[in-house]
Amino acid sequence: MELSKRQEAILAIVKTYGPITGKEIADRLNLSRAALRPDLAILTMSGLLGARPRVGYYLTGKEPADVIAGVLGSVKVAQALSQPVAVRDTSSVYDTIVTMFVEDVGTIIVVSEGGFLEGVASRKDMLKAAMTGKNINKMPVSVSMTRMPNIVVTHPEEHVLQAAQKLLSHQVDALPVVVSVKTDSGEKLQVVGRFTKTNITRLFVQLAGK
């Protein structure tokens, strides 16, 4: 969360003189209370300022970094995921490479009929397959992908902060978002989305714009 100069000035005033009323803050900044109201609302909703009726505003002791961590710890993957980019496990390596470039993604999710997770294929996987000298039009992607259970996944109800930690610790650029589904052959993971570093960046931009 990036603060404006006015918001930083408000925090400095509250730190020195708080608790302090909105009118007193406005007077010190030579502004009207109406002009100051949006900034006070942002600082209060973000958790950096607290407010008590007939007392005024005071510092909560939180830092902007604490606010970001708190927000990311409360936002769930379901609120930030993207549509999955996937191919069938019967697709060829060639078709998978084409899909990667058309969709401009670094990782493809590989699914079976019904959208159940079978594996993931990275650009590195596809490059290795292409360098074998074999006909990639006939080579199924399933022979070159990373298979279950060696895939890191996330779930719609998992918090964004936990999913982001998975991306970093496993050094991957995307996670399949899955839900558990009971089938006749047992429990399977159905793909409902993808969570990437781009999703995190977009979320930061949205938060900064509030």
Image (spheres, grey):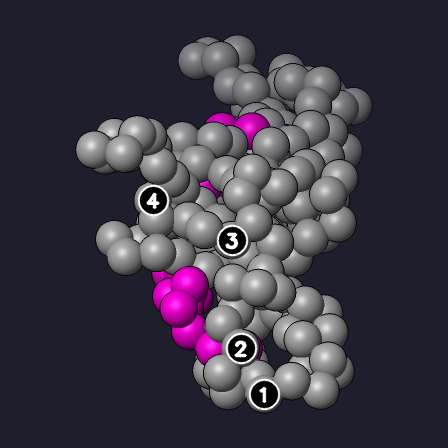
Q: Secondary structure at mark 1?
A: loop
Q: Is residue 7 visible?
A: no
- As shown in the figure, which amino acid type bears the numbered disc 2? Met
- As shown in the figure, which amino acid type bears the numbered disc 4? Gln
Q: Secondary structure at mark 3?
A: strand
* Label 4 or label 3, whichever comes before in sequence order: 3
* Label 2 or label 3, whichever comes before in sequence order: 3
4 or 3: mark nearer the eye: 3
**Is residue 16 found left or right of 7 in the rendered image?**
right
Q: Secondary structure at mark 2?
A: loop
Q: Which label number is shown at residue 139? A: 2
Residue receiving disc 4: 190
At horizontal 56% and vertical 29% (from top left) the residue drawn is 73
Q: Quadrant of the N terminus?
A: top right
Residue receiving disc 1: 135
- As shown in the figure, which amino acid type bears the numbered disc 1? Asn
**Is residue 112 found left or right of 122 in the rendered image?**
left
**Is residue 143 found left or right of 2 in the rendered image?**
left
2 or 4: mark nearer the eye: 2
* Spatial separation of the CA atoms under disc 1 and disc 4: 30 Å
Mark 2 neighbour class, 10 Å CA radius: few under 14, some 14 to 19, many 20 or more: some
At horizontal 74% and vertical 82% (from top left) the residue drawn is 131
| Residue bounds of the magenta highlight | 73-94
Front position in the image: 40 or 73:
73
Q: Main secondary structure of the magenta part?
A: loop
- Residue 84 coordinates in the image, percent (x, y): 40, 60
- As shown in the figure, which amino acid type bears the numbered disc 3? Gly
Q: Which label number is shown at residue 162? A: none
* Label 1 or label 4, whichever comes before in sequence order: 1
Q: Which label number is shown at residue 119? A: 3
At horizontal 73% and vertical 43% (from top left) the residue drawn is 170
Q: Secondary structure at mark 4?
A: strand
